[in-house]
Image (cartoon, grey):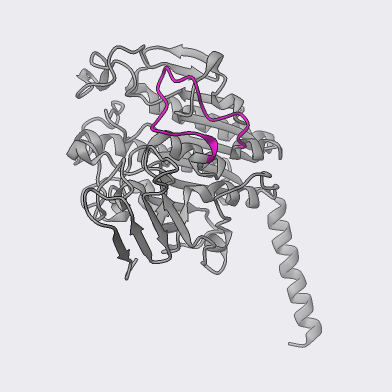
């Protein structure tokens, strides 16, 4: 081919790329709760029934070195939405309680605020756990989300001994936080149910999500849907459709219902002609609650779980799914929930917030060379402080643990990832 022909061909390619970019992508962010690295069939669990998540993994990009920023809920969620370590926003130590006075500072810029400023419709369903505040001042509708249907904190942070977790009449196993007010279900800032009916939550969330997707399709709006499930946090629950159906008991039923929700969202995208213009990203907030044994999930071959800075506490399953855009495969590149905001911001053609970010754009991993800009990951405990700093650091294939359970410093080298 002559130079003139080559130039014309390259021009056609550029026009095609620009034409594709003109359609701003939508985003569905799926977050599981206390789900372990080894809990999904696609990550090696022998008896988990997760057909929709496994299909996403087989047809999308599955991550093997994906980390949350914290081994517990609130700080992990703060980092996911802001692209900044939780120490920068002050979301530590531990997690927010129903009577906590603070929350994710309104001065922090969330991915919802970034996208909303670009004309995106934004909605959140499920577990917020980033503060309630006086008159609901820290709720999602004050953090960039147009709509919110969910629980302001964790569903175990209220009395539940008389509540049904599995219909028709199986009460919630074990104890929740006693002596507190019953957990409410909120629509934006309004309490629509208290105490919340656990078996009805996923069906409500699914309908809300499907309606939101359909409405955005009708209006021609790009959107962000943040679906933060309560599954598989203890105490597990499920609707009548999923109760008793898995081979892993209550935990498996809870996981199966979450997988069913994923399937409904994927179907909604397909039915509304949005499957090829929507990036669906799935991960978990932290590792499994291994101290609860079979009721707490599996880290697979990784050490420990929730609450620790070992691999089982912060290394998560993660899948990027975008038919026609993200090629199927497996990546061993280092990545984190901190990278979500920079990635979605770049894909939307928006400007990054003018603050210090700890995340990197994952576009090269999703679409290009496969190389991540992330070389390091810091592992902070649930109660970080200036004296101790991070408990562990990963650099490339090496991970050093500086604070352990009575052992000397530990250094690991990942020969095969």
Considering the image in quadrants, where does the C terminus appear? bottom left
Q: Magenta span covers which residues?
A: 88-109
* 223 with respect to 67 (left or right): right
Furthest-right residue in view? 4
Considering the image in quadrants, where does the N terminus appear? bottom right
Taking the magenta stretch, the answer to whether it contains residue 104 is: yes
Q: Residue at x 21, y 19 (%)?
A: 171
Q: Residue at x 19, y 24 (%)?
A: 174
Q: From this viewpoint, is residue 106 visible?
A: yes
Instruction: Provide the major secondary structure of the magenta segment.
Output: loop
Where residue 316 appears, x then y in whole percent? 37, 49
Quadrant for residue 83, please give it. Answer: top right
Q: Residue at x 37, y 51 (%)?
A: 317
Taking the magenta stretch, the answer to whether it contains residue 382 is: no
Q: From this viewpoint, is residue 56 visible?
A: no
Where residue 363 appears, x then y in whole percent? 58, 59
Q: Nearer the viewer, residue 415 or 299?
A: 415
How many numbered dots are placed on residues in this image?
A: 0
């Amino acid at each position: 081919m002559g130079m003139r022909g080559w130039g014309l061909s390259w021009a056609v390619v550029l026009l095609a790329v620009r034409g594709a970019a003109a359609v701003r992508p939508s985003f569905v962010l799926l977050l599981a709760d206390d789900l372990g690295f080894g809990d999904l069939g696609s990550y090696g669990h022998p008896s988990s029934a997760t057909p929709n998540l496994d299909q996403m993994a087989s047809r999308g990009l599955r991550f093997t070195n994906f980390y949350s920023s914290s081994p517990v809920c609130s700080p992990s969620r703060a980092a996911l939405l802001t692209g900044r370590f939780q120490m920068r926003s002050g979301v530590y130590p531990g997690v927010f309680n129903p009577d906590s006075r603070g929350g994710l500072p309104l001065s922090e810029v969330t991915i919802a605020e970034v996208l909303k400023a670009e004309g995106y419709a934004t909605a959140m369903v499920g577990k917020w756990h980033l503060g309630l505040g006086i008159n609901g001042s820290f709720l999602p509708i004050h953090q960039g989300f147009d709509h919110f249907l969910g629980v302001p904190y964790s569903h175990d942070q209220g009395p539940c001994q008389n509540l049904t977790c599995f219909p028709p009449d199986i009460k919630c196993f074990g104890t929740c936080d006693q002596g507190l007010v019953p957990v409410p279900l909120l629509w934006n800032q309004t309490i629509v149910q208290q105490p919340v009916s656990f078996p009805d939550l996923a069906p409500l969330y699914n309908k809300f999500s499907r309606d939101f997707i359909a409405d955005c399709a009708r209006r021609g709006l790009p959107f962000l849907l943040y679906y933060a499930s309560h599954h598989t946090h203890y105490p597990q629950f499920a609707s009548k459709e999923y109760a008793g159906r898995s081979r892993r008991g209550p935990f498996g039923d809870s996981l199966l219902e979450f997988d069913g929700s994923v399937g409904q969202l994927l179907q909604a995208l397909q039915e509304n002609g949005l499957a090829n213009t929507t990036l669906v990203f799935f991960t978990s907030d932290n590792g499994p609650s291994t101290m609860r044994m079979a009721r707490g999930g599996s880290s697979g071959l990784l050490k420990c779980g929730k609450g620790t800075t070992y691999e089982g506490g912060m290394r998560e399953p993660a899948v990027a799914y975008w038919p026609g855009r993200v090629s199927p495969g497996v990546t061993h590149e280092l990545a984190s929930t901190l990278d979500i905001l920079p990635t979605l911001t770049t894909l939307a053609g928006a400007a990054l917030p003018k603050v210090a970010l700890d995340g990197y754009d994952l576009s090269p991993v999703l679409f290009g060379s496969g190389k991540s800009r992330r070389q390091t990951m810091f592992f902070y405990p649930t109660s970080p402080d200036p004296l101790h700093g991070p408990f562990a650091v990963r650099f490339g294939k090496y991970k050093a643990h500086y604070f352990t359970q009575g052992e000397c410093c530990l250094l690991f080298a990942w020969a095969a990832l």
